[in-house]
Image (cartoon, helix red, strand yellow):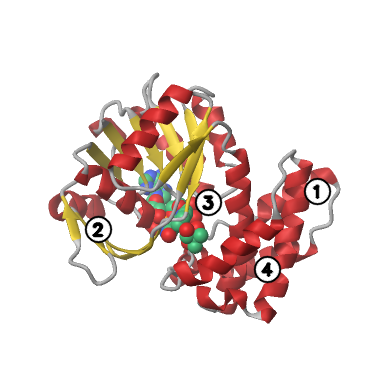
Amino acid sequence: MKIAVIGAGALGCLFGGYLAAANHDVWLLHRREQTANILSTAGISIHQNGNSPLTVGINATTTASDVGTADLVLVLVRAHQTQTALTEHAACIGPETWVLSLQNGLRNYDYLLDQVGRDRAFCGVTYEAAIVEEPGTITQTSTGLTTFGGGNAGACATIEETLAEAGFNVESVTNPRSVIWEKGSLVVATAPVLTLTGCPVTQLTTDSLDRIVTQLLREAACVASSQGIDIDVTTIQQTITSMADSHADHRVSMAQDIEHGRRTEIDELNGAIIDMAETADIAVPANTHVTALIKGVEQC
Ligand SMILES: NC(=O)C1=CN([C@@H]2O[C@H](COP(=O)(O)OP(=O)(O)OC[C@H]3O[C@@H](n4cnc5c(N)ncnc54)[C@H](OP(=O)(O)O)[C@@H]3O)[C@@H](O)[C@H]2O)C=CC1
Ligand SMILES: CC(C)(CO)C(=O)C(=O)O
């Protein structure tokens, strides 16, 4: 398969690297010429658990027309960059190209549906986790399930097989909206708290953090319900508890954004909760407060 990965950061290098190692024709689309040159010369190195790194050669460019028409485009920029990135790299998206987002954020599926329609838009979530050490070198801090879906069952089966053959633990579902809301709510409840406190993921289960995490989660569940999605708060709390252990070496991507002086995805997470709550006339004070605090930190 010819696969273009828009966004060659932590997850872009992780998915791109394993798909290239499985002999697909993978192209990373990066914003910076210098980094694209480093990637195409030195390839990607994936470090994990002190094992010797997997190093794999890869194509990288800033220009989608270098890629030609891809069979599959993976969107792995930050959520607020999705629409711009799809427009900017439209040259590799042909009339039959499938487009898959595994980003965090509550509105990515809608952005993809707007751009390519129901038969070619696929969206989901991943509990894989990675951190960029330097351009082309990443540490895979945790592995986890990737779940996605879309309106074209045949394409879902092929994408699932492709990701599974590349070593990912993956499943496809008919309608991805529930899994997007489940993980979206988990990130809404945990990412701003860990980012604002500077606490490691292992602290998530302490009483003081648990109180605010639970309030954020309950508000998200009310808003999900207004959208016709039922999410089970207890199940998500259990996932958070297991994440405190499984993701012990991970810095959540929102905290990574602040560390690197980048804009966070808050507008597409807690900000999206606030937008939808307003329309549905639901009070979301905890989400309103943490959003304001993260925006304050972004401006420091
Ligand atoms: N890292 C993780 O462990 C996990 C991340 N996620 C989610 O996955 C998504 C990606 O995260 P992550 O990989 O961590 O993010 P990164 O910031 O590491 O990577 C995103 C990359 O996209 C690049 N980019 C932005 N706009 C464009 C564009 N128009 N064209 C090409 N490249 C562009 C960025 O460049 P620049 O640096 O110049 O902005 C950056 O290199 C996010 O939604 C995140 O929440 C989900 C699960 C785990
Ligand atoms: C849930 C987690 C921590 C990793 O899968 C994530 O999505 C993030 O880093 O933002």
Amino acid type indicated by mark 1: Glu
Disc 2 and disc 3 in contact, CB within 8 angstroms: no
Number of residues whose C-alpha sits closer than 10 Å to that of mark 4, classed few (under 14), some (14–19) or many (20 or more)? many
Amino acid type indicated by mark 4: Val
Of mark 2 and mark 3, the one earlier in the sequence is: 3
Q: Nearer the viewer, residue 104 or 68?
A: 104
Q: Secondary structure at mark 1?
A: helix
Residue drawn 64% across and 63% down? Answer: 237
Residue 227: x %, y % from top left: 74, 40
Of mark 2 and mark 4, the one earlier in the sequence is: 2
Amino acid type indicated by mark 3: Asn
Residue bearing mark 4: 213
Residue bearing mark 3: 104
Residue drawn 55% across and 41% down? Answer: 108
Residue bearing mark 2: 136
Residue bearing mark 1: 278
**Residue placed farthest to the right in the image?**
281
Of mark 3 and mark 4, the one earlier in the sequence is: 3
In this rendering, would 161 be left or right of 42? right
Disc 1 and disc 4 in contact, CB within 8 angstroms: no
Q: Secondary structure at mark 3?
A: loop
Image quadrant containing the C terminus: bottom right
**Label 3 CB, ligand 1: below 8 Å?**
yes
- Nearest-to-viewer mark from 2 and 4: 4
Of mark 1 and mark 4, the one earlier in the sequence is: 4
